[in-house]
Amino acid sequence: MSDFGFADEARPVRPRAVRTSPDGGPPPRRSRRRPSLFAVVFVAILLVLLAFIAWAWSGRLHSDDVAAWTATAKEVEELDHSLTPLGHSEIAPCRESTDGHVTRTYPPSTGPQAAELVGFLTQKGWTQTAATPPTYARLTRTLVGHEVSIDVAAASGASLVDSLTATSPASAFGCLLR
């Protein structure tokens, strides 16, 4: 009892025991809390949402790339009606490489002259730019929002064309899931 008549109900303070490991080293660390079920579900939903957005975006890019390649192939097919090629190949975007290619080869003795082919393409709206040999001319044009190019392989403007290669660049991200 205290001087004022109250009973002191507080327990006496005992010193805390210091925990040590059995080998006498520092005390073991307490384990961290485990993530709650809500946090795990939230992170899982967030990852699924991000994966869906990436998939949708890559699909959109891929469809745009294929549309540009298809427009390029149609342009070259129009050229085929006037200047018949010897051989042809068409490789869609994401098949063998990221870019799509349309290639035409011409007979070595009866193919079109390089200047004639370039003139035909410039009349169709293609713009001639600088080319590096063995390419005689490089022509560019924007189709479906993509800048596509055509390379005309020939020794000179008066010589016959060896090949024509149209390239439609594509997005590597668009090819990611293809």
Image (cartoon, grey):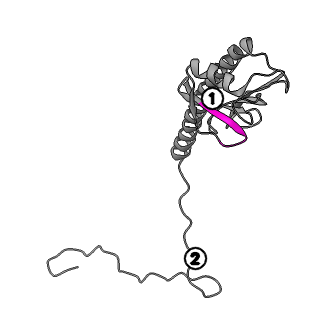
- For this orientation, the residue located farthest to the left is 4
Q: Residue 115: x and y, percent?
A: 67, 26
Residue 48 lies in quadrant: top right
The amino acid pointed to by label 1 is His
Give the labeled residue for mark 2.
28
Q: Quick check: 168 above or below 111?
A: below
Q: Dot 2: what SS?
A: loop
Q: Which residue has dot 1 on it?
A: 62
Question: Is residue 98 in view from this perspective?
Answer: no
Give the residues in magenta. 132-139
Choose between 98 and 121: the one closer to the eye: 121
Query: Who is closer to the viewer here, 49 or 129?
Result: 129
x and y, in percent, of residue 173 in the image: 62, 38
How far from the left and from the top, in percent, is residue 67?
Answer: 62, 22
Say above or below: 114 vs 34. above
- The CA span between labels 1 and 2 is 55 Å
Quarter that holds the C terminus: top right
Give how far across and how far down residue 15 sits, in percent. Answer: 42, 84
Q: Is residue 33 above or below residue 67?
A: below
Task: Tell me if 175 is positioned left or right of 33 in this view.
Answer: right
User: Mark 2: which amino acid?
Assistant: Pro
Q: Nearer the viewer, mark 1 or mark 2?
A: 1
Secondary structure mostly taken by the magenta-highlighted segment of the chain? strand
Q: Residues within 10 Å of mark 2 (few under 14, many from 20)?
A: few
Which numbered dot is residue 116? none
Label 1: element kind = helix
Q: Name which quarter of the figure residue 135 lies in.
A: top right
